[in-house]
Image (spheres, rainbow, N blue to C red):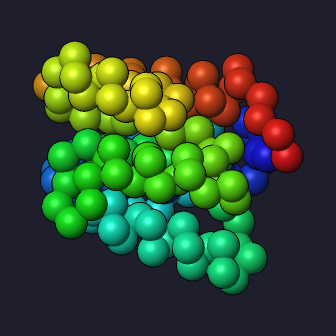
Amino acid sequence: MSEKGSSAFLVFLAEDDPGDANLVKTAFQEGGYSCQIEHAWDGAELMLMLKSALDSGARLPDLLVLDINMPRKNGIEVLSEVKADAALRDIPVVMLTTSEADRDVAKAYQTGASGYVSKPVDVDSLFNLIKGIEDYWFGTMRRPR
């Protein structure tokens, strides 16, 4: 696993809104950790990226960041597939979504989410939120190698 200041952390982001995707990618890139962001426009594309990494022996991501409401395959469906796959289930998954519905929060945690955060409406708050995610997952938490 990467350490602050060394090789980049790999983050797979699934986000169908172009504006939100660009803001989240920029926030990760401007954060305190070196992050390589791989972006998928929906859950189906993200699952293809994960399967491709598995099939080729490529590096798996250090973190998945999923929107809930996406076309083709939503974030909860992706989360369920990831947690059902022995090769993927240890990857932390943070739900980053506009939904503040209690049922969505409960479903995400019941399905195995590592965290659930609501997207703030202003850019500064979003950047602070992403900094908190980076600090927690890349600075504080330790994962198996």
**Near-viewer residue (43 or 24):** 43
What is the residue that sits farthest to the right in this orientation? 145
Instruction: Find residue 126 and report its image quarter.
Output: top left
Instruction: Find residue 105 and report its image quarter.
Output: top left
Q: Where residue 56 sits in the image (x, y, percent)?
A: 69, 82
Asked if one can make out residue 90 in the rendered structure from this viewpoint, the answer is yes
Residue drawn 17% across and 61% down? Answer: 71
Above or below — where is 93 with respect to 52?
above
Asked if one can make out residue 23 in the rendered structure from this viewpoint, the answer is no
Above or below — where is 52 with respect to 96?
below
Residue drawn 33% across and 68% down? Answer: 44
Badge count: 0
Q: Is residue 100 left or right of residue 62?
A: left
Q: Where residue 26 sits in the image (x, y, percent)?
A: 37, 46
Residue drawn 70% across and 20% down? Answer: 140
Residue drawn 33% across and 21% down? Answer: 106
Q: Where residue 90 sits in the image (x, y, percent)?
A: 68, 44
